[in-house]
Image: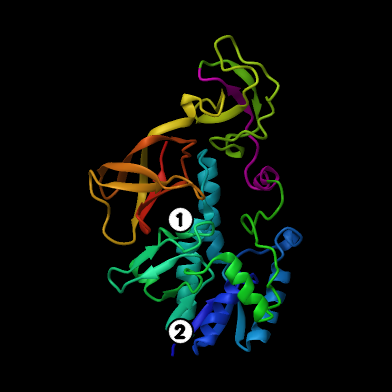
């Protein structure tokens, strides 16, 4: 049997992951990762309550647990990038970087220092095969699959990793927790990014990035309203524009159609807005990505794959038009809606996650 360190978050998924490994006879130890100095955000990011839940889980499972503070690493490796991307008018996904830099780097290094042979988390994904060609595959539960957020992991990072929930559905995980009388069996799943919590996103971002008011304009240049900063908006955004009752000019879509954010002009500080969900400015057939990361061999030029340009999206058929060590160009068979710079495009071959990169303008 192996010595395994499990990342316990205080939720049901990681608790069941630890339970299953303990039932298999492994030597299991828990680590609670504190990634944010909550200070005055305690009500929005309940770190203290999560750790209390972890202590109860550890007592129920009869395993040791420790709290490890990775806040400095998180600030330097994840949050600084998060703010830098928003300053550039892009929309980053910190969960992707958190996995690559914290959960499978800082946490992995700490677990190894404890003598661990493996680390485990409550992620819904599957690992198949052996080094140097271990594969990351989608979870059995398509509704919970988290391979999209794990695409930046290297072979060295997934080699010691275990995902005990990869073959289970969420209802099954809940039932296992109930039968084992885990104290978090009915705990609600966490949503969003911990350091933002349930607070309004714009209010949080204003703590770090000052407002930069500018015009909302149509592609033709007609001013439709004002925005407080390009960083507060993302492509495809409908709510929060504040121009819902503004009528378009002659030739626009019918006045009943809603407005959407469709682009950003950083030089003029203008937010491009259009009417109608299927406006051509919201549809893309070609996507270019940089800062590429491949779990195994990269895709081949001319190859047909499935790709996601956002989480919880069905795989969209595409062809690799060009690829270099630095750049990937994909041609989609059907237009993709609201492709957003700063987000990740992730490629799949059937259930196998190949990797991907950051979408460029």
Q: Which residue position is annotated with label 2?
A: 116
Q: Nearer the viewer, residue 238 or 171?
A: 171
Relative horizontal placement of residue 60, taking residue 98 as reference (left or right): right
Q: Determine if the magenta segment contains residue 29.
A: no
* Colour scheme shown: rainbow
Res. 318 image quadrant: top left
Left-right relation of 98 to 249: left
Mark 1 crowdedness (10 Å alpha carbons): few <14, some 14-19, many ≥20: many
- Looking at the image, is 29 positioned above or below residue 236? below
Closer-to-camera residue (319/168)? 168
For the N terminus, the quadrant is bottom left
At a point 40% along the width and 76% down the height, the residue shown is: 160
Would residue 256 be found to the left or right of residue 234 on screen? right
Estimate the x, y position of residue 269 in percent, counting from the top left.
55, 28
Single out the residue that lies furthest toward the left: 301
Front-lying residue, 256 or 51: 256
Judged from the image, the secondary structure of the residue bearing numbered disc 1 is helix
Q: Position of residue 296 (x, y in %)?
A: 29, 61
The label shown at residue 148 is 1
In the image, which residues are magenta? Answer: 201-219
Residue 58 place in picture, x, y as percent: 64, 83
Kindly check if marks 1 and 2 are in contact, taking CB atoms under 8 A apart as contact. Answer: no
């Amino acid at each position: 049997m192996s010595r395994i360190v499990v990342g316990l978050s205080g939720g049901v998924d990681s608790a069941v992951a630890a339970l299953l490994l303990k039932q298999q006879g492994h030597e299991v130890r828990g680590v609670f990762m504190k990634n944010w100095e909550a200070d005055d955000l305690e009500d929005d990011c309940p770190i203290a309550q999560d750790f209390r839940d972890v202590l109860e889980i550890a007592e129920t499972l009869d395993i040791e647990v420790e709290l490890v503070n990775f806040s400095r690493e998180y600030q330097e490796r994840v949050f600084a990038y998060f703010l830098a991307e928003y300053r550039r008018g892009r929309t980053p996904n910190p969960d992707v970087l958190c996995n690559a830099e914290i959960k499978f780097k800082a946490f992995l290094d700490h677990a190894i220092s404890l003598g661990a042979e493996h680390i485990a988390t409550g992620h819904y994904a599957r690992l198949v095969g052996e080094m140097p060609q271990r594969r990351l595959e989608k979870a059995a539960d398509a509704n919970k699959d988290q391979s999209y957020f794990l695409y930046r992991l290297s072979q060295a990072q997934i080699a010691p990793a275990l995902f005990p929930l990869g073959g289970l559905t969420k209802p099954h995980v809940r039932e296992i927790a109930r039968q084992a009388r885990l104290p978090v069996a009915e705990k609600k799943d966490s949503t969003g990014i911990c350091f933002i919590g349930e607070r309004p996103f714009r209010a949080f971002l204003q703590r770090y990035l000052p407002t930069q008011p500018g015009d909302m304009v149509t592609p033709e240049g007609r001013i439709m309203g004002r925005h407080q900063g390009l960083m507060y908006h993302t492509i495809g955004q409908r709510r929060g524009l504040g121009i819902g009752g503004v009528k378009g000019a002659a030739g626009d879509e019918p006045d009943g159609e809603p407005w959407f954010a469709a682009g950003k002009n950083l030089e003029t500080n203008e937010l491009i807005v259009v009417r109608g969900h299927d406006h051509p400015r919201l549809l893309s057939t070609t996507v270019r990505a940089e800062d590429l990361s491949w779990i195994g061999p990269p895709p081949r030029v001319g190859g047909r794959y499935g790709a996601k340009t956002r989480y919880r999206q069905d795989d969209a058929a595409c062809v690799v038009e060009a690829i270099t060590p630095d750049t990937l160009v994909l041609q989609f068979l059907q237009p993709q809606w609201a492709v957003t710079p700063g987000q990740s495009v992730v490629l799949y071959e059937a259930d196998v996650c190949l990797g991907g990169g950051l979408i460029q303008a």
